[in-house]
Amino acid sequence: MMLDAFARCRLHEDFEPVTEMGANPYYRPVEERLVTGEVLVDGRVLVSAGSNDYLGLSADPRLKDAACRAVRRLGTGTSGSRLVNGSLALHETLESRLAAFLGQQAAMVTPSGFLANMALGALAGPRDTVLADQLIHASLIDAVRVSRARLRRYRHNDMEQLDRLLDGCDPAAAALVLTEGMFSTTGTLCDLPGTAALARRYGVRLVLDGAHDIGLLGAAGRGAAEHFGLESAVDLHTLAFSKCFGTTGGAVAGPADVIVYLRHHARSMVYSAALSPASTAAALAALDIIETEPERRRRALAAADRLRADLTGLGYDTGGSPTTIIPVHVGDIVPCCLLWRELFAEGVFATAMVPPSVPEGRALIRVSATALHTDAQLDRIATAFAVAGRRLGLIS
Ligand code: PMP
């Protein structure tokens, strides 16, 4: 007899007590998403405090209308992958708009942000090295695994360690540096000046995942690269439409020859059905808004500043991120999930992040602010954190 492959199908040991206490934060279905940014869960209207929809576009009537028009004209599916019969003129319109927006030669739209990153797997091979920040997203790690390149990770924004790792790379093979503009769990920004200077010094390509920052940062919304005035230092950008673009899908933008190569070699382009007409049209409508309504960025960032000050004032450790993501550090899984449960009871729908999404012992509630949050909603979130934290003895 061999081992049963299903024998491993058990969750982390902490989940049993957490579930028994009614504090399992995962797979809670939203019944309705309101234009106010609130959500209906278990029949209750909750303030959304963990959304990636920073600009508040996912329930915007303009995106909904664009998606409905696309469905009427093109249907609900795409019938195949981009390579074969799934490419739409609408995808190409979005690709040229994205390339122009980001100042890159070309772009390709992928079925998700995860798959945009997975496409990067085609850029490295077994002899190459990929150097990556310790906090990069799972999709980037999986891309490196698929490429079979050697993954060397440096501590978050530790430029001295990156320098040493680059110094140790095989000059006869290629190397890539992978990082994120705005990190998804900590809300911190990449040290782009330091990273770009090292990439230039060692002559290696720099790939930036702009999933969270494109649309949000920079005066024109072109992300962390624009924020730092370093757009020309980014060789390739990846994007996710699931954040500022208020829909789903992703893209890779960069030099024309690289994009043509990826269209033929990235497994996510060749073997996964193309992005739906509804999401493609919604992303285009979102891009119009990103380009013309900079005040949404300012509102989201100002809401975050206010909420961060309130939560820090209550005594929570928020790590000092400068963006819309505010990590409320708790530590262990059980107290983190209990805090989530108490917030939920107080009418706040937040996100609990536990290992392996964060390092062991670094469980946190990931709070995010959006352009839709009113002062009253921000106050409700802060009050819920005050009541819940005191009830659990997390703050005094
Ligand atoms: N990159 C980063 C940094 C992310 O945080 C995420 C998802 N949260 C992705 C890529 C994947 O994007 P998507 O959810 O659109 O597939």
Image (cartoon, helix red, strand yellow):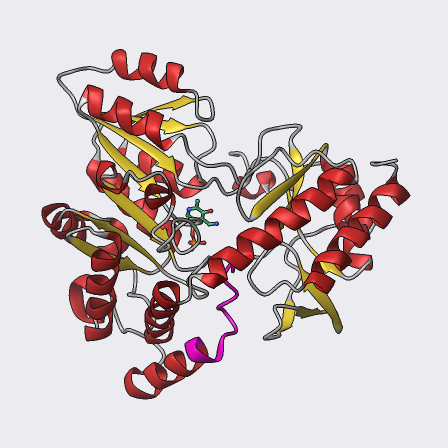
Q: Is residue 395 left or right of residue 180?
A: right
Q: Quadrant of residue 124?
A: top left
Q: Image point 78% across, 62% down: which residue? A: 347
Q: Is residue 192 left or right of residue 12?
A: left
Q: Residue furthest left?
A: 257
Considering only vertical position in the picture, is 72 above or below 6? below
| Number of numbered discs overlaid on the protein picture | 0
Percent of width and height locating residue 199 = 25, 26
Q: Is residue 324 magenta?
A: no
* Nearer the observer, 67 or 81: 67
Q: Image point 33% across, 82% down: which residue? A: 70
Does residue 10 appear in the picture of this structure?
A: no
Q: Quadrant of residue 204?
A: top left
* Nearer the observer, 35 or 230: 230
Percent of width and height locating residue 157 = 44, 25
Percent of width and height locating residue 324 = 55, 49
Does residue 182 appear in the picture of this structure?
A: yes
Considering only vertical position in the picture, is 315 above or below 131? below
Q: Is residue 154 left or right of residue 385?
A: left
Percent of width and height locating residue 122 = 22, 41
Q: Quadrant of residue 395?
A: top right
**Most common secondary structure along the magenta stretch:** loop
Considering only vertical position in the picture, is 224 above or below 97? above
Q: Residue furthest bottom?
A: 72
* Nearer the observer, 273 or 70: 70
Q: Quadrant of the C terminus?
A: top right
What residue span does the magenta drawing correspond to?
53-63
Q: Image point 28% across, 17% down: which residue? A: 166
